[in-house]
Image: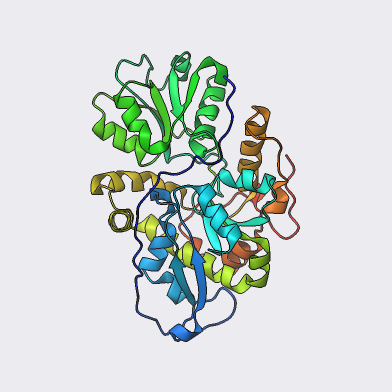
Amino acid sequence: MKTTISWTVGRRPASVIFVTLVAMILPWVTAGPAAAGAASSATLAKVSTGIVGAIDQLGTPVALDRGFFEKWGLDVSIARPYPTGVDQLNALQAGEIQIGQVGVPMIGAVIRGMDLVILGNYTGSAARLGSDATTALVAREGSGIKPGDLQSLRGKRIAASFGTINHLYILGLLEKAGLKPSDVTLVNTPPQEMPVALLAKGIDAFSGWDPFPIMALKDVAGSYEVIRGGQVIGFLGFIVAMRDWTEKNADTAERFLAARAEADKWMRANPAGTAQIAVRWLPGTRPEIAQDAMKYNIQQLDIRISANNYRALYSANDRLNKLGHIPSVIDVNKVFAPQYILKVMKEHPDLFSDLAAIPQATQVGPGYVFRP
């Protein structure tokens, strides 16, 4: 089945009201670019950033909540949570925010001429290519789909949000099973409507990111997990900014990445505490849902950049292009700007000490060029 991609489909809408959290200003001494230090609020560099109201975008709220941004010399404000990644990209291009978090929709934005750069991952992995632990395929009772048997997807109605990571995930699962998209019926469905569609038996299964698979398993009687993860795709979840802003504010970008790296490390060590923050910052998120989701989310908290991330973006772009969902491919070498996170990694290795080492063959450095 050939489908037409809609770049307006993205994360779930969220009517989240962000409250400015004022943390104690710590007497750190500034030691240079990407070094901790904030003597007074007057010296803090101001940054406006955006997120979409979703579990895997909690790194920025956590960095604000725990005082990491101030520790690294930044006065960060979080703009209203955007309904989709596309809305956030529009705000970025308009100058409403300086730094954002977005995945697959950035491909369409770059194709249309948006001059943005990737500074790091808000979710994903630099240590390995496959990183999809926060995504799952959930089926309803009586669907005829067998757990773990991807061949049993043939002929089924499966919900996905076209042009998002859950769309790429089901495409990856079908490819793994030796099936074509035309062997199933893909139903374009917003993520928040997937559990309801499953309950109403309008679909046989859905491909979704957390918390929606977890919600369905708890709320839809008889539903079950067909597969979670499987390393069939490299996850796309990038911290992005406009190129001109980044080049003019390199020190600020480095500080932001350092604060986010520290927040990620705290989250990896404190999933229960992160779940509590999720409940506070994402109204409507049930504690037990947040708790379960964090078990998977912390597996993909790796802000570093490696050749695996270049390949993940290239593969996603290439797959969508070959299937006719997007008109062209982008040069990933022009989009990645790894020098900022590489500097943080070099100067502050302690922020990454609990992460798996990046294989030497996939490490990037000055002058790195990705070749498919």
Residue sitting at 53 percent across and 23 percent down?
A: 174
Quadrant (top left/top right/bottom left/bottom right) for the N terminus: top right
- 309 relative to 22 in the view: left or right: right
Quadrant hosting residue 354: bottom left
230 lies above or below 342? above
Which residue is nearer to you in this view: 111 or 120?
Answer: 111
* Residue 32, visible in the rendered structure: yes
Q: Is 74 on the left or on the right of 197, as rendered?
A: right
Where in the figure is residue 234, as x and y percent of width and height?
55, 40
**Residue 274 occupies which quadrant of the picture?**
bottom left
Q: Residue at x 47, y 85 (%)?
A: 42
Task: Name above or below for residue 62 compared with residue 255.
Answer: above
Q: How many marks?
A: 0
Residue 124 can be seen in this image: no
Q: Residue at x 43, y 58 (%)?
A: 59
Residue, far front:
94
In depth, the one of 113 and 266 nearer the eye is 113
Could you tell me residue 109's position as x and y percent? 63, 47
